[in-house]
Image (cartoon, helix red, strand yellow):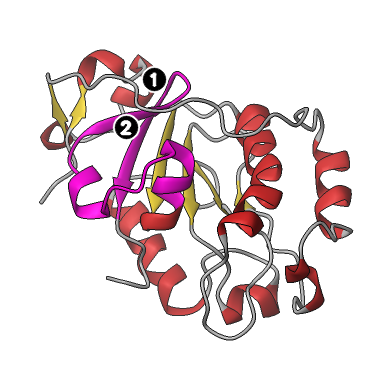
Amino acid sequence: SPITIPSAIIPPTVQKQVPAKFINKTEVAPTNKPLSNKPLIADWHTLQNSAVNCEECNLWQHRTHVVLERGNREAKWMFIGDWPSEQDDLQGKPMQANSGELLDKMIAAMQLDVENDVYITNIIKCRPAGTRKPTSDEISHCSNYLFSQINLIKPQIIITLGSDAAQALLQLTTAINKLRQQVHYYQDIPLIVTYHPADL
């Protein structure tokens, strides 16, 4: 089913990029509050250096690369996934291999340019060992990097990819199928929940 976005809360510059079939008139109340009490990192150089050298949780012991970002730091659209895949870890960029190819096709279908119009990251910057999910403590330790990214980019809309990304930002445990097809907020930024490309 198509995502529906209330036209009233989408900035005009973004509305022009959103196909009409994705817009409706139903506004949804904000559902979340900021997640971290740490001071936000105020510049990209410090953020990148801090992430690359981070040892706040045990995930650093298993990583090949810190997986911080890809795309445009001045983009209006921000896509946030769950955690790095094996290929992400090897290449040092989020959403690689089959998942990345599908996401890029989805973004292109939205009439957006992957390199210029979007910014892509994950809630976790290091890949958990094996196939396990990150723990709530690991997500918490890593959260300030994500919140700092959001603050630096100041996107006009956020798309979460996967249940962990949605639940972390919204501070909910609600199943992803119940969060879809409505508009949530991260602070004052409209937030849309959809499935992770790996699941699709």
Q: Is residue 55 visible?
A: yes
Q: How many marks?
A: 2
Q: Is residue 63 left or right of residue 191?
A: right
In contact (CB < 8 Å): disc 2 and disc 1: yes
- The magenta segment is 165-194
Query: Is residue 113 in view?
Result: no
Q: Residue at point 73% right, 70% down?
A: 59
Question: Of residues 108 and 26, which is closer to you in this image?
Answer: 26
SS label for mark 2: loop
Q: Residue at x 80, y 38 (%)?
A: 44
Q: Which mark is residue 13?
A: 1
As for residue 181 lying within the magenta part, the answer is: yes
Q: Is residue 159 covered in magenta?
A: no
Q: Position of residue 67 (x, y in %)?
A: 68, 63
Horizontal arrangement in the rendering, residue 94 relative to residue 110 (left or right):
right
Q: For the C terminus, give its image quadrant.
A: bottom left
Q: Position of residue 49 (x, y in %)?
A: 88, 50
Q: State the CA–CA distance, disc 2 to disc 1.
A: 7 Å
Q: Is residue 83 left or right of residue 58?
A: left
- Can you say whether 199 is above or below 141 in the image? below
Please tell me which residue is depicted at 26% across the width and 53% down the height of the picture.
175
Residue 184 lies in quadrant: top left
Give the residue at mark 2.
17
Is residue 175 left or right of 20 when viewed as pictured?
right
**Picture quadrant of residue 156:** top left
Image location of residue 53, percent across then percent down: 89, 58
Q: Position of residue 17 (x, y in %)?
A: 32, 32
Residue type at tag 1? Thr
Q: Nearer the viewer, residue 21 or 60?
A: 60
Label 2 environment density (alpha carbons within 10 Å; few <14, some 14–19, many ≥20): few
